Amino acid sequence: MARRFVIDRGRMLAHQRAFWELPNFVKLLVGGYGCGKTHIGALRSIWSSSFNAPIPALYVSPTYKQAKKTVVISIKEILSRAGVRYRYNKTDHEFFIPGWNGTIWIASGDEPESLKGPNLATAGIDEPFLMKEEILQVVLSRLRHPEARLRELFLTGTPEQLNWGYELAQNVDGRYDLGTVIGRTADNVHLPGQFVAMLERAFDENQRAAYMEGRFVNLVAGRVYRHFERSMVAERAVPQGTAVMAGIDFNVDYLTAELFFVAGEGVHFFDEIRLSDATTFELAERLHERFPGIRVFPDPSGRDRRTSSLGSDFTILRDKGFTVEARAAHPPVRWRNGEIDKVTNAALTHASDAAGYAVEKLFPVRLPERVYGREPGHWRA
């Protein structure tokens, strides 16, 4: 005989509870990092699978890879802590909960085919503003099961620029029966204090507004680096005994090395080598003439072998005596909605990429995706 479980709303944070109790067909929780968005979304999907059983619930993530690290692990943790038996089919990305004959389908926003299928009663979208608006429309079109006890769509995410998510949250034309709740990072009393303090130090005012307070703001305003001020540019000689390093971006036009040194808390770029229609051999030779054997931070794709050479770009640099340091893959891109002009002057984008590889490798910002075992709102007997 299956055990009976209920949701303990008293354990929820105030914004989680407000989101849970929204009467609207479309429920939206916009919040900062660590405010408990994914947890409450996972809990809602479990509840929906029970309330509308045996009609499956749909839960969409930007990619299957991201789902594996967020929504899937959240659902597993909630069910396991509550002592609820379940099966998860990794091939079909499907949870089955025999206790109430419930099913949760995990889908990917970057694979539209995964969103097609039979009619549904409820669906959730995690981090919807990292996806195209058409994903919202596709999911909405599936919520028409004739035997549903409840039909709803819930969305939980962090603001991503002034994109379609901003227009959705405003709902100016009243297109949707929509309720919106804002969740702040600092409102999650279960987060370690040092985590909140770290975010406050790492972000500027606009970033704190978006990633800690859940507000839609313009984060890039048409520039690659928001805090760059040309009036502050000044020539500076490399201090005696200071190590010179270089960030490298591999392109036919342009092959770019940005030269810099670190002094105190500052990274100072003082020169560059930019070659058109050149090879990595030529860049390595030019760099060796000026700064032999230095540390270099190239594009991670340079570890791949090229058909035009017996070795990789990394091998060429190492054979010339350079110390090569790079990520295993490209760093994650957060500013995907930035207005970077790659047409008017493509050389500038290669320079910023080369500089970025070095800075990100030397000074990575590590933000835990979630705090395990600390979120409220668990199932209880």
Image (spheres, rainbow, N blue to C red):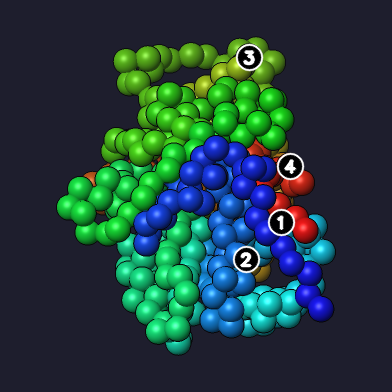
Residue drawn at x 58%, y 79% is: 53
Q: Which sits earlier in the primary sequence, circle 4 or circle 1?
A: 4
Q: Are marks 2 and 3 in contact (CB under 8 Å)?
A: no
Instruction: Residue 379: give its label.
Output: 1
Q: Amino acid at mark 3?
A: Gly
Q: Is residue 45 visible?
A: yes
Q: Residues within 10 Å of mark 1 (few under 14, many from 20)?
A: many
> How much space separates mark 4 and mark 3, taking CA atoms?
37 Å
Q: Amino acid at mark 2?
A: Ile
Q: Which sits earlier in the primary sequence, circle 2 or circle 3?
A: 2
Q: Residues within 10 Å of mark 4 (few under 14, many from 20)?
A: few
Q: Which quadrant holds residue 197?
A: top right
> How much space separates mark 3 and mark 1, taking CA atoms?
50 Å
Q: Which mark is nearer the camera, 3 or 1?
A: 1
Q: Which residue is mark 4?
A: 374
Q: Are marks 4 and 3 in contact (CB under 8 Å)?
A: no
Residue 170 is situated, as x and y percent measured from the top left of the image, at: 27, 45
198 relative to 216, above or below: above
Q: Which sits earlier in the primary sequence, circle 3 or circle 1?
A: 3
Q: Which sits earlier in the primary sequence, circle 4 or circle 2?
A: 2
> How much space separates mark 1 and mark 2, taking CA atoms?
10 Å
Q: Secondary structure at mark 4?
A: loop
Residue drawn at x 71%, y 56% is: 379
Q: Which residue is mark 3?
A: 264
